[in-house]
Image: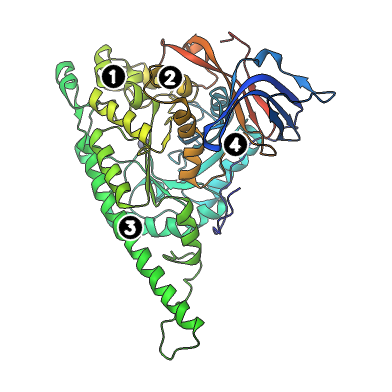
Amino acid sequence: MDTSPRPSAPRLTCRRALPERFLIPAVHLFDPQHGVDLAGDLLVEEGVIAALGERVALPTGVDVLDDLAGCSVFPGFVDPHVHLRTPGHEYKEDLASGSLAAAAGGYVAVVAMANTDPVVDCGPVAAWVLDRAETDAVIRVGQVGAISRGLKGEELAEMRELADAGVVAFSDDGRPVSDADLLLHALRYARGTGRALLLHLENSSLSLDGIMHEGRWSARLGLRGIPAACESGPLAHELELVRYVDAEGERLAATRREAEDQAAGGPVAGGPVREDAPDGDPVPGGTALGAARATVPLVHFQHLSAADSVRLVRRAKEEGLPVTAEATPHHLLLTDERLAGFDQNLKVNPPLRSAADRDALVAALAEGTIDCVATDHAPHAPQEKEVPIEDALFGTTGLETAFAALYTGLVLTGGLPLGRLIEAMSAGPCRVLGLAEPRLALGAPADFCVVDLGETWKVSTAGFRGKGRNCAFLGQTLTGRVRLTVVDGARRFARARGEV
Ligand SMILES: [Zn+2]
């Protein structure tokens, strides 16, 4: 686990299961991030990978999962951005159904957003959700704490209390943080807790009641558009604040080093003395922050959709600013043209944009400007989606289709190496959030998924484990089927060959 000296560690939790003993023979073991790429067997015992290699001796009394022969084993996927709708909106999804959907997609951990009812903006609510996850969730669930109280963007949420309850990061996702002063304070507080701010970028006064990307297709269809500047505008603004807070941190660190140097050379009359900030106050430049900075970004930009945003993030990274970014499968694969069928499942926020925007996102994912894939899994009830597109709520589900959609749409077409996709779905999000990376290594926790890269299947509502039916990929034929998901050495989800 992460050993950075944070005030409190993030808590990711799920239902305990008895560790199992099983061998998966004749599979492709592929963990590109940690240099594993071989054909062989994998043995799980006592919650860990007990053996892996070209030929693993079979101990007595061990289940042999012959039916998985020929499949690929990957480090388990981690999703930094899902909506599990608990508490308050369990008619859309709950911790049991959402985590099962995640397991069916090969995920071993997901991080839930705070836009629930009540909002997760204080310690007790965060603790309640995580306690529920410990009894209801089949794979690990982490929780994000709100940046502002009630997601209203007016005053800060109880950020230190949320950190102590074990939230993974902070986000007002679903809404932008428009007040610069509030955001500035949030940046300092988040850094004080060793956690990133995950930012939903949207200029609300520009998006208004827009339905889709503003462009040729919105004009043709007569639907109100949401310009790309709605995202890239706030992004440029937020980068200015990141630059300011980053420089402030550097300045304070330099002052501290100076003081330490002088102290090492003996007491200096009138020399600078740094007092520790009182508990609960932001501690920019403090000891814990240096370590935290090394593991998590100051800001992580959520669900990028526009080429202009990609350009800004690329430049910021070249400059060395501590920022990261994510993109969703639907933004990486689909474009605004698809709205011509008025399919409500394609109404998402930010909207599906032009082919040029999508191509920029794919290139950015390939080169690492976009660090990771996030589904923004947003289940809704039929009565919220099966209405005229103007009235339908924004969002698509994504956990059960993410890998297969991206493997089919980007890897099989030659646009993206499989290794980069696995990295962006497993190690990438962990680095953003400062979590331990799942790995295929001797003695590592057995957190992995098994995928049949040869199986082709049609996305249909009949196969969904989650409650939501609103999937942007409904009806598509995809290649790559998750057959098994293992967390802590226990099988949390299994699917027979050809099973829906
Ligand atoms: Zn969002």
Q: Which residue position is annotated with label 3?
A: 184
CA gap between label 1 and label 3 equals 37 Å
Q: Which residue lies under the disc numbered 4?
A: 439
Looking at this rendering, what residue extends furthest in the bottom direction? 269
Query: In the image shown, does 378 or 246 lie closer to the viewer?
Result: 246
Q: In the displayed structure, would residue 254 be above or below residue 366?
A: below
Give the mark, 4 or 3, whose residue is nearer the N terminus.
3
Q: Residues within 10 Å of mark 4 (few under 14, many from 20)?
A: many
- Judging by the rendered image, the residue that carries numbered circle 1 is 389
- Horizontal relation, residue 492 to residue 381: left or right: right
Name the kind of residue labelled 2 in the image.
Ala
Marks 1 & 2, CB-CB < 8 Å contact = no
- Mark found first going from the N terminus, 1 or 3: 3
Q: Is residue 349 left or right of residue 128?
A: left
Residue type, mark 3 in image: Leu
Is ligand 1 closer than 8 angstroms to the Cβ of mark 4?
no
